[in-house]
């Protein structure tokens, strides 16, 4: 027990100092993408100019996305000013990867509502969610999938039942995370009517996100290769330079 606790403490301390170092080196960490090629991705949806994106952002803030584990975390934030670390990551990747909204909108919301808000740590986390940070998060890595298909966090749905009480009548486990898979009889027994007592799922376009990120990365590889070629590198050196560049995309 003690060893595990100390390892956790060391890891958290390391991440904190890493965040402070990033903010010191890059003072614009809270507002500008560190990897600048992600700043104006073609697949970003901007709430200022897109009414649908604005409504999706509002639903995310209120915890009304129709994805229970995301909604539970966001409602906990409003109710208590705090979120479990996994809920923060789930909510962040959902906003960025599923809704295609720039990470800055989420960073501002979290910084304004978390009682433990820390400019460096919050900014680093959201940069990672937006793929522009030094440690890019992948929504498809397993534990960050927000659709309830991977229930490493809140496996029985107790947190969902507490913060999304309209789903508390559903059986513990799978159906609290994925109520759209419940039968009509199960929904009726739990007093749940999707679209009325609990929102239907917000529309997401994961294919768009994958294409957008892939487009940015391909562009960076091409740019690195072109720069190396322009500098007079041999073909072998160009390939090596491009390979190195890929490591930090």
Image (spheres, grey):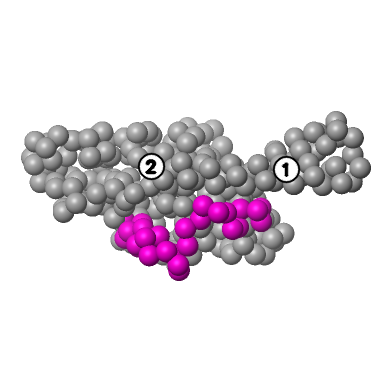
Compared to residue 4, the image places residue 17 above or below, namely: below
- Quadrant placement of the C terminus: top right
Residue 114 lies in quadrant? bottom left
Give how far across and how far down residue 180 sits, in percent.
23, 40
Residue visible at 18% across and 47% down in the picture: 194
Q: Which residues are magenta?
A: 34-63
Compared to residue 113, the image places residue 245 above or below, namely: above
Give how far across and how far down residue 136 sits, in percent.
58, 44
Does any portion of residue 14 appear in the rendered image?
A: no
Mark 2 sits on what residue? Answer: 146
Residue visible at 66% across and 56% down in the picture: 36
Q: Which mark is residue 104?
A: none
The mark closer to the camera, 2 or 1, is: 1
Mark 1 sits on what residue? Answer: 222
Whether residue 164 appears in magenta in the rendering, the answer is: no
Q: Earlier in the sequence, mark 2 or mark 1?
A: 2
Residue visible at 59% across and 58% down in the picture: 40
Q: Residues within 10 Å of mark 2 (few under 14, many from 20)?
A: many
User: Is residue 13 shown left or right of residue 170?
Assistant: right
- The residue tagged with tag 1: helix, strand or loop? helix
Compared to residue 148, the image places residue 123 above or below, namely: below
Does any portion of residue 158 appear in the rendered image?
A: yes
Give how far across and how far down residue 45 sits, in percent.
47, 58
The residues bearing labels 2 and 1 have C-alpha atoms spaced at a distance of: 33 Å
Whether residue 58 appears in magenta in the rendering, the answer is: yes
Residue visible at 8% across and 36% down in the picture: 185
Q: Residues within 10 Å of mark 1 (few under 14, many from 20)?
A: few
Residue 147 lies in quadrant? top left
> Observer-nearest residue: 19 or 234?
234
């Amino acid at each position: 027990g003690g060893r595990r606790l100390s390892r956790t403490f060391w890891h958290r301390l390391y991440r904190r100092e890493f965040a402070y170092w990033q903010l010191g080196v890059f003072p614009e960490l809270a507002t500008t993408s560190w990897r600048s090629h992600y700043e104006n991705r073609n697949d970003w949806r901007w709430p200022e100019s897109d009414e649908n994106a604005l409504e999706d952002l509002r639903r995310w803030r209120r915890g009304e996305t129709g994805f229970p584990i995301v909604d539970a975390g966001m409602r906990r934030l409003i109710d208590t000013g705090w979120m479990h670390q996994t809920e923060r990551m789930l909510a962040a990747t959902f906003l960025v990867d599923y809704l295609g909204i720039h990470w800055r909108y989420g960073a501002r919301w979290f910084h304004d509502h978390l009682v433990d808000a820390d400019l460096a740590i919050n900014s680093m986390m959201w940069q990672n969610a937006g793929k522009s940070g030094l440690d890019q998060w992948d929504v498809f890595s397993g534990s960050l999938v927000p659709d309830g298909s991977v229930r490493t966090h809140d496996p029985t749905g107790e947190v969902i039942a507490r913060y999304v009480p309209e789903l508390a009548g559903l059986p513990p486990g799978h159906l609290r995370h994925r109520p759209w898979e419940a039968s009509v009889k199960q929904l009726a027994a739990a007093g749940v009517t999707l679209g009325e007592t609990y929102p239907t799922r917000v529309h997401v376009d994961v294919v768009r996100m994958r294409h957008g990120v892939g487009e940015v990365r391909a562009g960076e590889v091409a740019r690195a290769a072109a720069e190396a070629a322009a500098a007079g590198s041999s073909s072998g050196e160009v390939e090596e330079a491009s390979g190195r560049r890929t490591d930090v995309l």
